[in-house]
Amino acid sequence: MLITIVILIIAGISLYEYMSSKDWQQVTSVERNDVVFEDRNHEYGAYQIRTNYSRNLILVMAGVVLFIGTTFGIYKLIMNLPTEKPKEIPLDLTAFAVDAPKDEEIIEPLEPEIPPMEKTIQFLPPVVTDDEVTTPPPTQEDLTDTKASNTTNENEGDPFAKVDPTPPKKVEEKVEKKEEIIYDFVDEPADFPGGRAALLKYLSENIRYPQVAQEMGIQGKCYLTFVVSENGYISNVKLKKGVTDCPECDAEAIRVVKGMPKWAPGKNNGKAVNSVFSLPVTFKLN
């Protein structure tokens, strides 16, 4: 492809020179050659070369282009000729046949033999006593093939005879649960995060005045107690004294207190402890 482009460029330049050969500055110009060779023999080689230069160059370029085109066409023609597909030779599977394995003798593993337990007889050191002896001492026959031991074993040859298969009961350890101490009075009382002003703001923003109390014009104050743990969590919220004739007000106050964020716990001797806190909640109509 690149060679073809170069040839086309050269052919174009030669064609341009041939077409512009009438210019006086061109060596191949016919007018210039007629003047130069006016009194000379036109059969002279230089005149013929200059006159036919452009024509000969175009013929050469055309021949080269024609040769390349013909060669490329023949190549494409050969590449597109149908080719015969090779015949598939069937695969002979018998060449890969493997003889079946012969039956091998299976040798079963032998069970391990458990050595028989030796017969023993309990040996007790002599003790001087005034009590009557009910257990006679072992005879010589009893001591035959018998070893002295701290226990008596009569199950000779059978290590598993009279063995209780029930595993011993696991003794449960009693873990004494440490009782949490809740203090009614502490050195440093528990505090709402941000202080008393933040506590009043929290109650005013979160308490919803019951609709029944508003319609009946009920006002009053209820007193709640709750435990602030050593970690600051609220628990054991109880009603100590409620609003007269308005259990809805008491329930609302308990709901809001249970949803409080963590407090700063009370302290005794600088250590956080569980403490009881009393809180009055006022319901007042504007």
Image: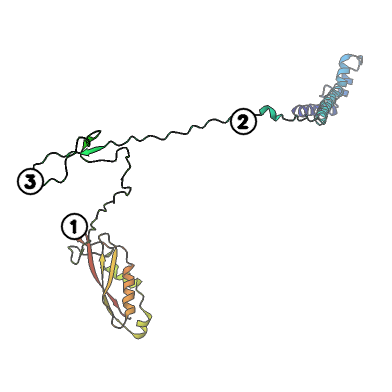
User: Which residue type carries mark 1?
Assistant: Gly
Q: Earlier in the sequence, mark 3 or mark 2?
A: 2
Quarter of the image with the C terminus is: bottom left
Crowd rating for badge 1 (residues with CA inside 10 Å; few <14, some 14–19, many 20+): few
User: Which residue type carries mark 3?
Assistant: Asp
Q: Is residue 167 above or below residue 201?
A: above
Q: Which residue is mark 1?
A: 270
Q: CA distance from mark 1 to mark 3?
A: 70 Å
Q: Which residue is mark 2?
A: 100
Q: CA distance from mark 3 to mark 2?
A: 87 Å
Q: Earlier in the sequence, mark 1 or mark 2?
A: 2
Q: Tell whether 205 sits left or right of 44.
A: left
Q: Which residue is mark 3?
A: 130
Q: Quadrant of residue 174?
A: bottom left
- Residue at 51% x, 32% y is 106
Q: Earlier in the sequence, mark 1 or mark 3?
A: 3
Given residues 66 and 10, the one toward you in this image is 66
